[in-house]
Image: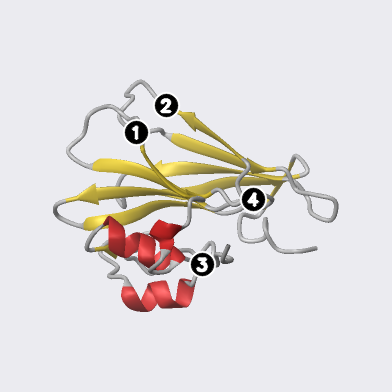
Amino acid sequence: MKSKRLAAPALLLVACQALATDDLQALWASSPLGNCFTNQHQLLSSLFGDDYGEDENILVTAAEFEPSIDRYFWIMDATPKINGTRFLARSAAATGTCIVLYAPFVTGIELRFGQSRALPEEIRTRDAGGPSALSSKVVYRYDPQQKLYRPHQCFSRSAQVSCESVYRPE
């Protein structure tokens, strides 16, 4: 089994930034949020390497949202004993396949819908921490202008903290 690591600098070089703004990646410098690719295969190869298809722990599942012109799918590395990063991606004819949610270190996820069940208004993630790590919770809110989920509130040991510092070691 090969270890999976996000190659964020490589993602930035390879990916087109169709939805880019100056502050798009300000919250987490290594975030691939907003990166767009020609297709799903190119996105998965950039995240996990060209042999991602041989790894049974790389899971891609359709997102069960109300019908839409765009297609959404979840991506995660389910390698045991890691708090995996989860991605939500959108495939659209106009923009290609784009990462619309980047959620690192996730052990649990909760979707909160508004009156419209088209897309969740909020996505809440948590990690279990561990013997030497603090547990954390991140609330992502949908940004309809950018069509992305951005960190909105972050908590460590139930206390609200800056989202820029939630995953930094103390």
Tell which circle, 4 or 3, labels the residue nearer the N-terminal end. 3
The dot on residue 83 is 4
- How far apart are labels 1 and 3 at the CA level? 26 Å
Q: State yes or no: discs 4 and 3 in contact (Cβ < 8 Å).
A: no
- Look at mark 3 in the image and give the residue it sits on: 6
- Look at mark 2 in the image and give the residue it sits on: 113
Instruction: Point out the frontmost of discs 1 and 3.
Output: 3
Crowding at dot 3, Cα within 10 Å, few <14 / some 14-19 / many 20+, comes out as some
Instruction: Point out the frontmost of discs 3 and 2.
Output: 3
Say which quarter of the image contains residue 124. Answer: top right
Depth order, front residue of 163/54: 54
Amino acid type, mark 4: Asn
User: Residue at left 48%, top 64%?
Assistant: 31
Amino acid type, mark 2: Phe
Crowding at dot 1, Cα within 10 Å, few <14 / some 14-19 / many 20+, comes out as some
Q: Secondary structure at mark 1?
A: loop
In screen coordinates, is 159 left or right of 96?
Answer: right
In which quadrant of the rendered image does the C terminus lie? bottom right
Measured as percent of width and height from the top left, residue 70 is found at 21, 42
- How far apart are labels 2 and 1 at the CA level? 7 Å
The dot on residue 119 is 1
Q: Is residue 101 above or below residue 35?
A: above
Instruction: Point out the frontmost of discs 1 and 4.
Output: 4
Q: Secondary structure at mark 2?
A: loop
In screen coordinates, is 52 left or right of 156?
Answer: left
Measured as percent of width and height from the top left, residue 167 is found at 67, 58
Q: Is residue 72 above or below residue 55?
A: above
**Which residue appears farthest toward the top when viewing the image?**
115
Tell which circle, 1 or 4, labels the residue nearer the N-terminal end. 4
Say which quarter of the image contains residue 158. Answer: top right
Tell which circle, 2 or 1, labels the residue nearer the N-terminal end. 2
Depth order, front residue of 55/118: 55
